[in-house]
Image (tube, grey):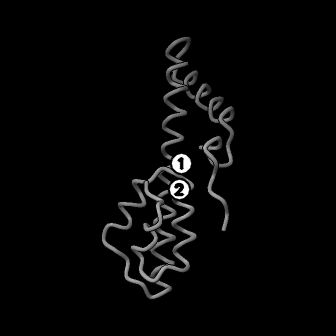
Amino acid sequence: MTRPPTPSRPFGSYTEEQVREEGLRLAHAKGLTGYLADWYVEHFLEVCAEAYAEGYAEGCAEALEVIFRRRGLDVPDGLRERVMSCRDDEVLGEWISRSRTVESASDIFDGGAQP
């Protein structure tokens, strides 16, 4: 299993500097300079990081659903919502690891890993 991104890489394969440069390019394209450009870049970084985290959580939820179905386990109603609300990559990774051996889908949440 591929390790989830570390908190220092919240933008996937892009570095913070690359995302910051793109935010600045977009700010200037909108005619923003000075304080407004700085604000735009910081907001852009936050939005990008949140979008990446949301996409990662959604991918984990889909992976868990596939694993459980292929293993013949019922998928609990609240599984997707619980996984989607988690923003801790280590917890998500642990849930994926547990999904291969648990006896029921809800067992992935046992053992201390909570969002």
Instruction: Identify the residue at horizontal 62%, vertical 27% (top origin).
Output: 25
Q: Which is nearer the eye, 92 or 59?
A: 92
| Numbered badge on residue 44 | none
Q: Is residue 32 above or below residue 114?
A: above
**What residue is disc 2 on?**
56
**What residue is disc 1 on?**
52
Q: Which is nearer the eye, 39 or 82?
A: 82
Q: Is residue 66 above or below residue 56?
A: below
- Within-10-Å neighbours for mark 2: few <14, some 14–19, many 20+: many
Q: Secondary structure at mark 1?
A: helix
Image marks 2 and 1: residues in contact by CB distance under 8 Å: yes
Left-right relation of 19 to 59: right
Instruction: Identify the residue at horizontal 42%, vertical 84% (top origin).
Output: 73
**Residue 20 placed where, x, y %?**
62, 30
Instruction: Identify the residue at horizontal 68%, vertical 48% (top origin).
Output: 13
- Within-10-Å neighbours for mark 1: few <14, some 14–19, many 20+: some
Q: Secondary structure at mark 2?
A: helix
As measured in the structure, the alpha-carbon distance from the residue carrying label 2 to the one carrying label 1 is 6 Å
Count of marks overlaid on the render = 2
**Residue 16 placed where, x, y %?**
65, 35
Amino acid type, residue under disc 2 in the picture: Tyr
Left-right relation of 76 to 21: left
Instruction: Identify the residue at horizontal 53%, vertical 56% (top origin).
Output: 56
**Residue 92 placed where, x, y %?**
52, 60
For the C terminus, the image quarter is bottom left
Q: Is residue 68 above or below residue 95?
A: below
Amino acid type, residue under disc 1 in the picture: Tyr
Q: Which is nearer the eye, 24 or 30?
A: 24
